[in-house]
Amino acid sequence: GLMCSTHNAAGEGNEKAIHWKDDNAEDFARAWLDGYQVEKPQLFYIALPKVYGLSDSTFVSKAESGIISEFTKGKDYALKLTEQEIKSIDERYWQFAVPVEDGE
């Protein structure tokens, strides 16, 4: 009889632990996701200097395999890149990097 009761106690304990994980899975995932989101890298636009007397800044909107191929006037279509991504296009573009504000 002793073996039986020990086994039940252990089995019950494990089951409770498993249920706790199931019940709290969403909290666990949320904590992990929220924690992860805090770590997201700062993003930057590449804002090129005003050229030919144009009034608006020109933002890079497309870059492929290290070559910038399209530009845009506003931030709506501007690329949001990490420092590493900008420097991988060309180190010189880093001087034109403008931080993306929260909510942009």
Image (cartoon, rainbow, N blue to C red):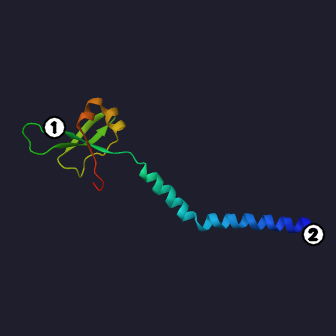
Identified by mark 1, the residue type is Pro
Q: Position of residue 13 (x, y in %)?
A: 74, 65
Rendered location of residue 25, percent (x, y): 57, 63
In the drawing, what numbered circle is on residue 49? 1
Q: Which of 52/70 is in front?
A: 52
**How crowded is the residue under tag 1: few (<14 C-alpha within 10 Å), some, or many (20+)?**
few
Image location of residue 40, percent across then percent down: 40, 48
Label 2: state its secondary structure.
loop
- Residue visible at 21% across and 43% down? 59
Q: Which quarter of the figure has residue 16?
A: bottom right
Indicate which disc, 2 or 1, sits on the residue closer to the N terminus: 2
- The residue depicted at 51 percent of the width and 56 percent of the height is 32
Displayed quadrant of residue 7: bottom right
Name the quarter where the C terminus is drawn.
Answer: bottom left
From the viewer's side, name the closer residue of 70 and 58: 58
Alpha carbon of mark 2 to alpha carbon of mark 1: how far?
84 Å
**Pointer 2: residues within 10 angstroms few (<14), some, or many (20+)?**
few
Does 17 appear above or below 37? below
Q: Which residue is mark 2?
A: 1
What kind of element bears circle 1? loop
- Residue at the spot 28% in from the left edge and 48% down from the top edge: 100
Q: Which quadrant would the N terminus be assigned to in this image? A: bottom right
| Res 47 quadrant in image | top left
Q: Kindly identify the amino acid type of the residue bearing the numbered disc 2.
A: Gly
